Image: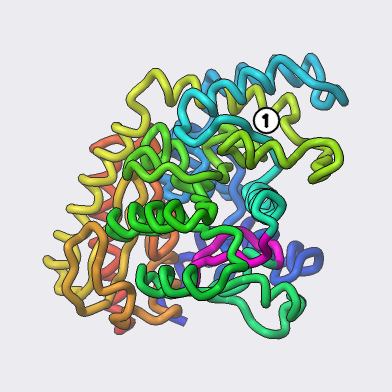
Amino acid sequence: MGRITEEYIKKHPKSAANAKKAVELFPDGVTHDNRRFNPFPLAMERGLGPKKWDIDGNEYTDFRTGHGAMILGHSHPAIVKAVAEQVAKGTHLSSSTELEVKWGSMVKQLVPSAEKMRFTSSGTEAVMMAFRMARTHSGKTKIIKFQDAFHGWADGPYVGTDLDNPNNGIPKQTRETMVILPYDITAVERTLDNDKDIAAVIFQGNKVINPSFIQQLRAITKQRGVLFIIDEVVSGFRWSRGGCQELYGAIPDLSTMAKILAGGLPGGCVAGRADVVDTVTKGKIAHPGTFNANPLSAAAGATALAIVAKEPIGETADRLAARFRKGLNDVMSKMEVPGCAYGVSSIVLTRFGADHDCDHQYCPSGGKAKGWSPEQKNLLVQALANRDIYCWSDSFILSATHTNDLVDNTLEKVEDAIRAMRAEGAI
C-alpha cells in the first residue's frame, strides 16, 4: 500500500466504517454502480453551492454535482424554499396539480421539440416510454442506438453499452429489437435503407462529437420517415437552455430528460411531437406511475427551470469549464503527462495518459488511444480526495456556483496529485 492510499484511509475513518456496514446491505456496498470505489467510497453528509462535506467533516470542492443534476449548485435557496413549502402542503396528493402544469409549461418554453410531454420518475423511465411511443406510433419494432451509448439500465436501452454482457438477464428476444451501430452516418443510412422495421434512432445528447453528425442524423431520419430521439438526460438545460437540440439546431421527434429537469430531485420526462406523445391516451399506451410529476419534484423542477431561463446559469458554468479545460491541458503539458481535457458545455472530460492528437473539444481520436489503467485512475481520485477535491478520474462536472478561484485552486491540486503519483512510481 502506497502513501496516497494510506492517507486516504487515515483521513476517512467514518466513511470506512460506513462502507463496511453497506457491504452487508448492498451488492458491492453501493446503491449506484458508479459509486464503487477502492478501498471504499466516501459517504457525504451535506452540500452547499460548489462544496460538499463528508461524514468525517472533510470539505470538498465538488465536481460530481449530483451526477450532473446540480447545475445550480447544492441547496440552492430558491429550491430549498420551494420544496420546504411543498412538504408542508403534501408530498403526494393522488391528483393533478397546478405545479405539474407550471413545470410542464417551463419545459415547453425551453425545449424546442416539446409540444406535449409525460413526466416520469427517472431518465431510464423516460427512455423506456420514448421507445414505446416510437413503436406504437410507427407500428415498427427496432430501435437504432450507438455502440457504448448509455440510455439507462432498462433491458432494451442497455443493450450495446460498454458493460453489456450475455449473462445480465436481458432476453435474446429483447436484444433482437435493438440495432447497435458505430458512429458512422453511412452505416445509419445503409441500415435505414435495408431494414424497414426501424421505429426510431436514438442519440445520446451528451456524446461529445462533431455537431455535423447529429445534424445529419436528423436529416436522414426525416428523409426516411423514421423517428429521431435525442436523450437529453444529461445535456438538457446544460448544453444550452434548450439542450443539445437547440445548440446544434437538430430538433428531434422525441426528447428524454431528467437531472436538471427536476432541480436535483427525482424526475424525468419524455417530450416531443404531439402526435407521437399522444400515443399515451386511453386504449393505447398505459402510463401509470405513482410518483409521476409528484409535487416535490414539480416544485423543485419548475423553480430550477425558471432560474435557468432567466439567469446566465449555463453561460457561467460553460465559461468556468472552458477555463478548467485549458488549465488541465496546461497541467498535463507542464507535468509531461500525455493526455487531454476536452468537451463542450460545462462537463470537462479527461484522458490521462493517452498519447494522441486532440483538438481539446471533440477529441477526434475517439477514445482509441490507450490511457491510464483503472488502478492509476483510482489512485488519482484518491490523491485528489486527499486534497479535498471530489471527482471522477475521467470527468469534472461544473455548476454555475463554481468560481475562478476554485477552478484555479483545483488545477494546483491536480498538479500536486500527479506529482504524488509520480513520487510513488504509479506513473
In the rendered structure, does residue 26 fall within the stretch colored magenta?
Answer: no
Question: Residue at the spot x=61%, y=48% of the render?
Answer: 55
Extent of the magenta region: 140-155
Which of these two is toward me, 222 or 296? 222
**Which residue shows up at 66% across the image and 39% down it?**
277
Q: In which quarter of the image is residue 7?
A: bottom left
Q: Is residue 191 visible?
A: yes
Q: In this view, does 116 lie to the left or right of 245?
A: right
Q: Residue 246: give x, y in percent of width and height.
A: 37, 38
Height in image: 119 above or below 384? above
Residue 321, quarter of the rendered image: top left
- Residue 151 drawn above or below residue 319: below
Measured as percent of width and height from the top left, residue 150 is found at: 54, 63
What residue sits right under mark 1 in the picture?
297
Quadrant hosting residue 31: bottom right
The secondary structure that dominates the magenta segment is: loop
| Label 1 SS | helix
Q: Residue at x 24, y 53 (%)?
A: 325
* Magenta-colored stretch includes residue 151: yes
x 16%, y 69%: residue? 335
- The type of residue carrying mark 1 is Ser
Q: Nearer the viewer, residue 6 or 148?
A: 148
Does residue 293 appear to the left or right of 63 in the view shown? right
For disc 1, the neighbor class at 10 Å (few under 14, some 14 to 19, many from 20) is many
Tell me: 42 left or right of 289: left
